[in-house]
Image (cartoon, rainbow, N blue to C red):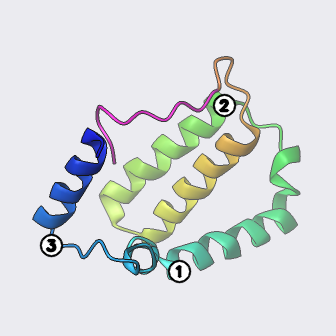
Amino acid sequence: MKTHSILRKRLLKLAGVDAGPSLLEQLRESEWSPRFEQLMRNRLIMGFFRYGPFDKQNRTTEQVLSNIEKRIKEYRKTGNDELLVDVANLAMKEFVVGKHPNKHFKSEDDGEHA
């Protein structure tokens, strides 16, 4: 058995999670918010009618990141969850069509995570 598998088993046991065949289904239910996803989709659809398809909006990476920061700042003040939905949508748009000169995806198993 690989060290990774041993560590995973121990961590799951410590977390009180049943690692049986239904674990993946349990995690799909517990680690997602259908309501949040629906709110994101609703706003993306409305955004299409206001601004056109998001891949045609020509926002720079800096504009998108500035918008994200602005909404996070406003959320800290107001607690309005709509701002978090906006942040998620802006992050997704940057992920899909962003123009950052060093844009890449590198999954890392160590370090700081959300």
Asked if the magenta segment contains residue 83, the reply would be no
* Mark 1 and mark 3: Cα distance apart in space: 24 Å
Q: Which mark is residue 16?
A: 3
Label 3, label 2: how far apart the Cα atoms are: 41 Å
* Amino acid type indicated by mark 2: Thr
Q: Amino acid at mark 1?
A: Pro
Q: Residue at x 80, y 52 (%)?
A: 54
* 49 left or right of 11 in image: right
Is 111 contained in the magenta span?
yes
* Residue 50, horizontal then vertical, whole percent: 83, 63
The earlier-in-sequence mark between 1 and 3 is 3
Which residue does the numbered mark 1 point to in the structure image?
34
Give the number of the mark in front: 1 or 3: 3
The reply to whether callout 3 and callout 2 are in contact (CB within 8 Å) is: no
Q: Is residue 29 left or right of residue 90?
A: left
Q: In terms of sequence position, does the residue under pointer 2 or pointer 1 come before the other?
A: 1
The amino acid type of the residue labelled 3 equals Gly
Looking at the image, is 43 positioned above or below residue 84? below
Find residue 48 and report its horizontal and vertical position in percent.
Answer: 83, 64
